[in-house]
Amino acid sequence: MHRHLSGWPELPEPTPIPISTATTPPAKAKTVVVNLLQALLTGEPAPEHSGAAALRAEFTAIRAAFPDATLAIVHQIAEGDLVGTHATISGTHTGPLHGIAPTGRPVEWSLLILNRVSEGRVIEHRGNVGWMDVLGKIGVLPPAPGSE
């Protein structure tokens, strides 16, 4: 069991992500992930990726709240069948976001994801979108120190 702060619940043991034999070359795997992210952000049709169901739902909300959103890849690495991506999304909050009324504020936030790619498809997805940062920048929460 991991050490934790007093009063916090016990943390489960992390589930390791095994590295398997890649069936998609790393450069191609990186392109698969970038193309999927761009299609999800713009709402363009994208091939079905079994590991991207959660992404589809979240990007639908992002498109509705930030219709002018753009995606920029900051860093991307591939090892075996895993692709790690750090990207930023920028847009203006002109639509509702999970029940939050539009503010008209411009926002940029980070997206950190790890995808497993096999045979040209994302088969597993894990990620972290900086929603706390977004909520601070649109005024729902106090902005994070240094985020402005």
Image: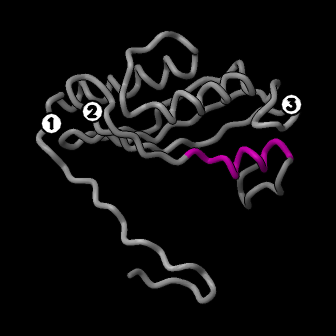
| Residue closest to the eye, 59 or 88 | 59
In-image side of 98 versus 54 (left or right): right
Pick whichever of labels 2 and 3 is earlier in the sequence: 3
Query: What's the amino acid at mark 3?
Result: Pro
Residue 139, horizontal then vertical, whole percent: 86, 47
| Residue closest to the eye, 123 or 88 | 123
Quick one: SS at disc 1?
loop
Q: Which residue is mark 2?
A: 117
Query: What's the amino acid at mark 2?
Result: Val
Residue at 57%, 85% in the rendered image: 5
What label does residue 102 carry, if any? 3
- Judge whether 69 appears above or below 129 on screen: above
In-image side of 104 versus 118 (left or right): right
Residue 136, horizontal then vertical, whole percent: 78, 50
Bounds of the magenta segment? 129-139
* Residue 131 on the magenta segment: yes
Query: What's the amino acid at mark 1?
Result: Ala
What label does residue 64 carry, if any? none
What is the spatial separation of the Cα atoms under label 2 and label 1, in whole angstroms? 8 Å
**Mark 1 crowd level (few <14, some 14–19, many ≥20, 10 Å Cα):** some
Whether pointer 2 and pointer 1 mark residues with C-beta atoms closer than 8 Å, the reply is yes
Whether pointer 1 and pointer 3 mark residues with C-beta atoms closer than 8 Å, the reply is no
